[in-house]
Image (spheres, rainbow, N blue to C red):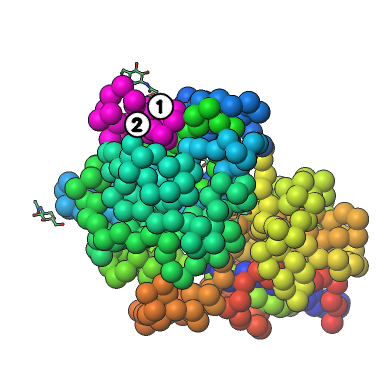
Amino acid sequence: MYTRKLLVSLIGLILINLSHYPDYVLSENVNLDFPFFTLRNITLLGDSYLRNGIVGLTRELGVPSSSSGSVMYNYPVAFFDQETNVTASFSTKFSFSIANVNPSSFGDGLAFFLSPNNQTLGSPGGYLGLVNSSQLSKNKFIAIEFDTRQDLHFNDPDEDHVGLDIDSLVSIKTANSILRGVNLKGGNLITAWIDYENGKKKLEIFLSYSSFKPEVPLLSVGIDLSDYLKEFMYVGFSASTEGSTELHCIENWSFRTMGFRPIRPKIQPHNVSDSSVPLRTPIPVSDSGNRHHKMIGLGLGIGFPAFFCAVLVVFGWISVKKWKGIKSERIITSELVTGPRQFSYKELKSATRGFHSSRILGHGAFGTVYKAFFTDSGTISAVKRSKHTHEGKTEFLAELSIIASLRHKNLVQLQGWCVEKGELLLVYEFMPNSSLDKVLYHESENGNPLKWTYRYNIAVGLASVLSYLHQECEQQVIHRDIKTTGCRLGVDSGYWA
Ligand SMILES: *[C@@H]1O[C@H](CO)[C@@H](O)[C@H](O)[C@H]1NC(C)=O
Ligand SMILES: *[C@@H]1O[C@H](CO)[C@@H](O)[C@H](O)[C@H]1NC(C)=O
Ligand SMILES: *[C@@H]1O[C@H](CO)[C@@H](O)[C@H](O)[C@H]1NC(C)=O
Ligand SMILES: *[C@@H]1O[C@H](CO)[C@@H](O)[C@H](O)[C@H]1NC(C)=O
Ligand SMILES: *[C@@H]1O[C@H](CO)[C@@H](O)[C@H](O)[C@H]1NC(C)=O
Ligand SMILES: *[C@@H]1O[C@H](CO)[C@@H](O)[C@H](O)[C@H]1NC(C)=O
């Protein structure tokens, strides 16, 4: 009798995962992410439309037109909790473009707004689709305008400014974006960040052509929005034209609120023997410390109030000591059916825009990781691509079945694989918050290093997953290379000792 030792190199992602609150529940923090738009969860009003995953807010006509439109997230978002007297902070990021078919025919601009009303739509022209021209005080809102026309009527300083508006288009404070090198109506993709910290009573707006947030805000307003943030509000965008050809497009959008106390997670007791039960239960954040730190932490189980961080495993060596190489490919494949599935090369190619460089999340020793959008299901995954040749599909599937059977809340879940055209592709759960090293080594926005309590939680979370891999899981996985840098995933098969 001979013993075969199957060694599998498993390169993982060490990534931080944010708790997700997809639905609105009373006074829970929300976290919305629209990497592209579908009709799901948004309401289009007025002249707005959806095309190729992008929302256009005003009529798309090559002739001068007057038009207004808005788009909103379908569900109300909690901003104030009566019981605890807590007002939420919020943070949003979106990429937009304002282009002019006829550059001399511009105006009027777009706005990001919070409004108590899900029917918020205003008039064309200087009203930015926010204010009804026949009832100026009808619509209530907190809005950030990206205004491309000077309306003296509303005391606009110039034709390229960003301003904070509350219930009126006469801005509380404005800033000229050209002075910071960003031409609002130049047609380029612009990314905007809007952060409000209720504790500091401060609103900050950042603009950039790149996806890196500038250090210095374009506009900073010291203001207490708690007087205006209602229990529930709708969030969205509006825009308008007035006899112009301006096009207003929103390409993607993420939005979240912070500051509410977590509602106890409903953790279901899981049966250890039932490996098909997904064990990733989000554990909400505790309400302490500043906003940045709130994103970080490890869920360590019931009663440990911390954000959790999904940690997966880098360059692990799976060593299956007495591998009984009897399992046929058929059995292994059927085992995989309940968990990860086989993807077609075509499917992965189109989800990553033909492995386009703009979709690269990172490079590892083993290959490149891409962000994949599956438009049919509206989901995002991380796809790891390698060009290694593999000795045999059977061995590869055997290894996959081990990886697929791993279940730990801090492990990134394998969703599927593809072996075609001499390539090996692995599909993993997408972790939106990049890699752990960014959190550990980089200072937060306000210059403080990550607190020791969070570091401790991360270490304990990592220890928990290692103990699972080394001792608790059915087929022991010996992990030999823990790294904090992310975006490395994969399986290197075909080692026989
Ligand atoms: C739409 O909202 C529901 C809950 O409100 C959420 O479960 C789902 O993920 C959302 N879909 C998208 C594409 O955002
Ligand atoms: C709620 O909090 C505000 C300050 O954030 C305070 O002024 C107010 O008195 C509080 N109200 C109650 C009922 O505690
Ligand atoms: C607005 O909200 C109400 C409930 O508050 C709902 O019945 C209605 O369908 C919503 N309208 C739109 C356009 O979403
Ligand atoms: C403005 O309000 C009037 C009266 O409520 C309404 O008939 C009209 O449609 C509104 N205009 C817009 C652009 O919403
Ligand atoms: C939107 O897309 C742009 C370009 O691909 C990217 O730079 C930006 O980070 C994205 N923003 C969000 C909120 O996903
Ligand atoms: C766990 O197993 C027991 C007995 O095998 C079963 O009755 C129970 O429903 C299972 N629980 C879950 C959450 O699957």
Circles 1 and 2, Cβ within 8 Å, touching? The answer is yes
**CA–CA distance between discs 1 and 2?**
6 Å
Residue 356 screen position, x and y as percent: 76, 56
* Magenta run includes residue 152: no
Decide if residue 415 is on the left or right side of residue 492. left
The residue sitting at 77% across, 69% down in the picture is 367
Q: Which residues are magenta?
A: 115-141
The residue sitting at 86% across, 66% down in the picture is 387
Q: How many marks?
A: 2
Is residue 21 at least partly visible in the picture? no
Disc 2 residue type (three-letter): Val
Q: Is mark 2 within 8 Å of ligand 4?
A: no
The residue sitting at 68% across, 52% down in the picture is 372
Residue 147 screen position, x and y as percent: 45, 44
Screen quadrant of the C terminus: bottom right
The residue where tag 2 is placed is 131
Q: Is mark 1 within 8 Å of ligand 4?
A: yes
- In which quarter of the view is residue 90 placed? bottom left
Ligand 4 in which quarter:
top left
The residue sitting at 55% across, 25% down in the picture is 65
Q: Is residue 19 above or below residue 247?
A: below
Decide if residue 251 is on the left or right side of residue 197. right
The residue where tag 1 is placed is 123
Residue 204 screen position, x and y as percent: 37, 60
Disc 1 residue type (three-letter): Ser
**Front-most of 58 and 393?**
58
First reached walking from the N terminus: tag 1 or tag 2: 1
